[in-house]
Structure formats: C-alpha cells, structure tokens
Image: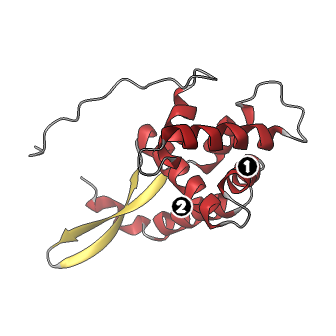
C-alpha cells in the first residue's frame, strides 16, 4: 500500500486559438517566469511555421503526429533490492508519456540555433517525420529498458 496521497487530477485548460488541451500543455511547458503571453506567441508561430511546406488541413495535425512519435512507451526506474540497485523497466502512464514528449521537444528546441520559435517548429517537423533529436532520445530510453528487461521481475 502506498503511503502517498492520491493525486488530484486537475481539469485541463483549453488554449484560446485551437481549443486544444495539448497546445495548452505545450504553452505551459514553454513558459518561463510566468510569461504566458510570450509563450503563447512562440507556440502559435511555431505551429504555423511547422505547417509550411505540408498539405495538412488541420493546423494541429503535425503537432499531434510529433507528440505521438515522441512518446516513450517504457522507461527505467531505480529499485533498491537487498543492497543492489537495479534499473527496472516499467510502462509509462499515458499522461506522463505526453509530458515527457513535450519536455523533450521544448528542451531540444531551446538547444537549436535561431531562436525558440524556429527551433520549436523544426523539432515538431522532425518529430512528425520520425527523425531528429527527440526520436533519438525516445529510442535511447527504449533501448535502455530493453537492455534491462532481465530485471523486470523486480517491478512492483
């Protein structure tokens, strides 16, 4: 039995332009020091730039595809058993999958040259096409879980 309290699930806010909870979460991930209007501007411009060159009718099609491609299915967690620490692969909850994918996209977009808007647009395009830094990070996470699958029986 867990000693922690149950987490209270908050209702997801919708963003003003697309009425999408996913865009709202991306804006929150991008936001620094409470500057929401600046984060909104960056995200909306990045979504528009990522649509350039594609024939997508839905403005969020590339964003949704990028998030789906970037979501990790497994990760490893450290478990201490008898004095040894094992990296135990576990399945990730859907909410955490999206959170990790968004965090990775924003982190790699910040590391790119040319500003956050251009970097975010590039990362979204790359992730939607199944390549780029985010996909490499996801594959590394899966590879680590695959390598440690012998310790899966320590999961509880």
Judge whether residue 142 can be spotted in this image.
yes
Graded by Cα atoms within 10 Å as few (under 14), some (14 to 19) or many (20 or more), the crowding at tag 2 reads some
Q: Which residue is drawn at 13% across and 44% down?
A: 4
Q: Do the residues labelled 2 and 1 touch (CB within 8 Å)?
A: no
Closest to the observer: 88 or 24? 24
Q: Which of 31 and 155 is in front in this view?
A: 31
Q: Which of 9 and 149 is in front in this view?
A: 9
Vertical comparison of 99 with 146: above or below: above
For mark 2, what is the residue?
A: 142
Provide the residue designation for mark 1. 121
Residue 141 as seen in the image, left or right of residue 77: right
- Tell which of 95 and 17 is nearer to you: 17
Q: How far apart are marks 2 and 1 (CA)?
A: 25 Å
Q: Residue at x 64, y 64 (%)?
A: 136
Residue under the point 60% across and 61% down: 110
Residue at horizontal 70%, vertical 54%?
123
């Amino acid at each position: 039995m867990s000693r922690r309290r149950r987490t209270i699930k908050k209702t997801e806010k919708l963003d003003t332009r697309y009425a999408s909870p996913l865009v709202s979460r991306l804006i929150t991930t991008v936001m620094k020091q409470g500057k929401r209007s600046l984060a909104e501007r960056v995200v909306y411009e990045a979504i528009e730039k990522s649509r350039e060159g594609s024939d997508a009718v839905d403005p969020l099609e590339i964003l949704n595809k990028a998030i789906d491609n970037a979501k990790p299915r497994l990760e490893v967690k450290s478990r201490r058993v008898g004095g040894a620490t094992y990296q135990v692969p576990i399945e990730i909850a859907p909410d955490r999958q999206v959170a990790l994918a968004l965090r990775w996209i924003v982190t790699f977009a910040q590391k790119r040259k040319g500003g956050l808007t251009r970097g975010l647009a590039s990362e979204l395009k790359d992730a939607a096409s199944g390549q780029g830094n985010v996909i490499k990070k996801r594959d590394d996470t899966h590879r680590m879980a695959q390598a440690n699958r012998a310790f899966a029986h320590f999961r509880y």
